[in-house]
Image (spheres, rainbow, N blue to C red):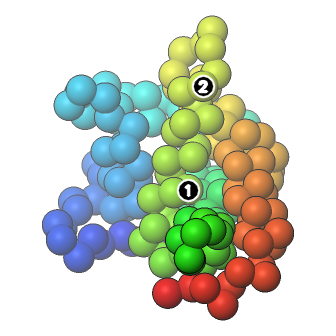
Amino acid sequence: MALQYKSTEVYLKPDVRFKSTLVAKFINNLMHEGKKSVAEKVFYQATDLLQTRFPDKEPLEVVEAAINNVKPLVEVKSKRVGGATYQVPIEVSRKRQLSLGIRWILEATRSKKGKAMHLKLADELSDAYKKQGVSITKRENTHKMAEANKAFAHFAW
């Protein structure tokens, strides 16, 4: 079953190859300076690489699993109470989980140097699928921070 993403503000058309709105959102976030065709080319080259790395899985399944592995369940937000500022753990909405997961994967991909973008993207997606890599580390750090500040959960708004 493919994840379908519909934003409440704007209807998102599914992408051409996988007919998935999740992929369309990912491509839109990957896009730089309005060059959507370049972003599509990079994404589809990365999925072709994922097909060779995981021959028993569909590339769309790998991408969905990678994003699901990176999505955070909780995060911390700063809340000022009196003169002190507390890091208050809060649950993350499904929509924000998706956007944070995609953003973290793309940040990790862009932080790597020395390779073509489709190679870096395929590496990060396969690492996230295997529950390792920079984007998974970011998720774990976010969860650890929320766990450490659980005492301030009563300040949640």
- Give the x, y percent position of residue 94: 48, 76
- The Cα–Cα distance between marks 2 and 1, rounded to whole angstroms, is 16 Å
Badge 1 is on which residue?
Answer: 101
Mark sitting earlier along the chain (2/1):
1
User: Any mark on residue 111, and which?
Assistant: 2
- Horizontal relation, residue 57 to residue 37: left or right: right
Q: Nearer the viewer, residue 152 or 70?
A: 152
Q: Residue furthest left?
A: 10
Marks counted in the figure total 2
User: From what the image shows, is residue 51 above or below residue 157?
Assistant: above
- Crowding near pointer 2: few (<14 within 10 Å), some, many (20+)? few
Q: Amino acid at mark 1?
A: Gly
Q: Which residue is found at the position 51% from the left and 57% from the top? A: 100
Task: Identify the secondary structure beneath mark 1.
Answer: helix
Secondary structure state at the residue bearing disc 2: helix
Whether residue 11 sits left or right of residue 49 in the image: it is left
Classify mark 1: residues with Cα within 10 Å, few (<14), some (14-19) or many (20+). many
The answer to whether residue 124 shows anywhere in this view is: yes
Note whether residue 37 is visible.
no
Between 5 and 16, which is closer to the camera in this rendering? 5
Disc 2, disc 1: CB below 8 Å?
Answer: no
Percent position of residue 85, x then y? 60, 66
**Amino acid on which the number 2 mark rests in the picture:** Ser
Write the residue at 37% across / 44% down.
29
Q: Position of residue 132 (x, y in %)?
A: 81, 46
Residue sitting at the far front: 83
